[in-house]
Every structure is written in C-alpha cells, then in structure tokens.
Image (tube, rainbow, N blue to C red):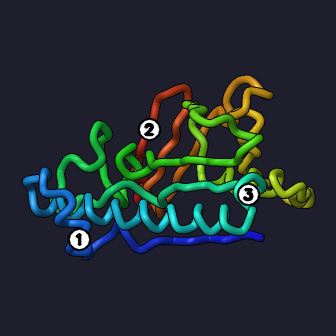
Amino acid sequence: FFLYLAHWGIHSPLQAKKEDYDALSHIGDHRLRVYAAMITALDRGVGRVLDALAANGLSDNTLVIFTSDNGGAGYLGLPNINKPYRGWKLTLFEGGTHVPFFAKWPGHIAPGTRYDAPVGHIDIFATAAAAAGAKVPDDRAIDGVDVLPYVNGKRDGSPHDTLFWREGYYQAVLHDGWKLTVTDLP
C-alpha cells in the first residue's frame, strides 16, 4: 500500500488545541507557543499513524518517510523558525528548501542513522519503488534516486552531485556545498 498524508499543520492560520497550548506554559511568546502546540498536534498525528501500523503488524515491513514541502513562512511573525538558515517559504534560500527528511524502516535503516548529504523530494519515488521491489520506468529519465543504499552504507558518496530548484524565473543550484540563487527576468 501507499499512503500520502499531508497534515495541514504546521500552517497558517496559527491555531492550536487549548490542552496543547496549556501544556507548553514554559514558552512565554504567545505566537511561538501556538506554533509549538501545532507541532505537538502534528507529532500526535504521526504517532497515530505509527501506532496503526504497529496494531496491524505492519511496522517492520513499512517504509515511513516524514518530510515537509518548505521551510517556515516569514509572514507568521516568528523570525527564528528557520534558524540557522536564511530565507523562508517561497524562497530558494536554505530557510525555504532545507526541511526535515526522516525515514524509518526496521531491518533496513538502523535506528539513529544520520545521513548528511543532500537529498530531495525527487528521491521519494525511486526510494519507495525500490523498497516495494517495483521497477521504475526505463522509457524516460528519472531524476530521483533510491537513497536507501546511501543511508544504510551500501553505497559511498552522495546520491546527487548537484541539485536544482526553479520557481518561475527564480532558480537555484546547490553544488559542492555552495548554493547560487538567481532571478532571471525576461
């Protein structure tokens, strides 16, 4: 099976359950506290999915990937949510593109594994196909790669020499740890 679950939180408008908000009384800034309470709700939602997998005996045979589509938005009024990265949602700076990317698959990914080379959402298709034992189409170029051999140490190096982003005329390239962003108006 394949499940794609896109939680609305953490997103604007900033709003949270009172019990989640109250549980974070050590956070003085109201807006940050609401944001943190939204993270609590998201965490609870992910936990429910993991619990359902366990209850159905599927935990050991399911690849779970947790990620986000972009960094935090500048219009939320929380200037440090993407710290230490520069930029926001809708920018191609690291604050807009550097997001969590967690994977869990018992027996295939050792608990506590950390992989620091850049990967992208373009890799999810190839990785999920490989995990399922499915062949990716060979009649077209597939930009993404199966990252599991890199994560579990069966392949050395990095899955990508270079990564590219484009949003209309706004473009970025990441190569050898350097990122170039340009706006090329016609």
Circle 2 or circle 3, nearest the eye: 3
Classify the position of the N terminus by image quarter.
bottom right
Q: Which residue is mark 3?
A: 62
Q: Tell me which amino acid carries mark 2.
A: Leu
Residue extending farthest to the front is 55
Residue 35 pos. (x, y %): 24, 62
How far is mark 2 from mark 1, CA to CA?
Answer: 44 Å
Compared across the picture, whether 144 is left or right of 33 comes to right
Q: Nearer the viewer, residue 127 or 163?
A: 127
Image quadrant holding the C terminus, namely bottom left
> SS for tag 1?
helix
Q: Earlier in the sequence, mark 2 or mark 3?
A: 3
In the picture of the structure, the residue carrying the numbered disc 2 is: 180
Q: Residue at x 53, y 51 (%)?
A: 165
How crowded is the residue under tag 1: few (<14 C-alpha within 10 Å), some, or many (20+)? Answer: few
Q: Residue, x 67% and y 71% (percent of image)? A: 3
Q: CA distance from mark 3 to mark 1?
A: 32 Å
Spot occupied by residue 79 in the image (x, y as percentages of width and height): 18, 50
- Badge 2 marks a residue whose secondary structure is strand
From the image, tell me which residue sits under label 1: 19
Which quarter of the figure has residue 39?
bottom left
User: What residue type is disc 1 on?
Assistant: Glu
Q: Residue furthest top?
A: 156
From the viewer's side, name the closer residue of 152 and 18: 18
Distance CA(mark 2)–CA(mark 3): 37 Å
In the shown orientation, is residue 154 left or right of residue 16?
right
Q: Give the mark nearest the N terminus, 3 or 1.
A: 1
Q: Specify few, some or many for label 3: CA neighbours under 10 Å numbering under 14, 14-19, or 20 or more.
A: some
For the point 37% across and 70% down, which residue is it?
A: 9
Q: Is residue 67 above or below residue 7?
A: above
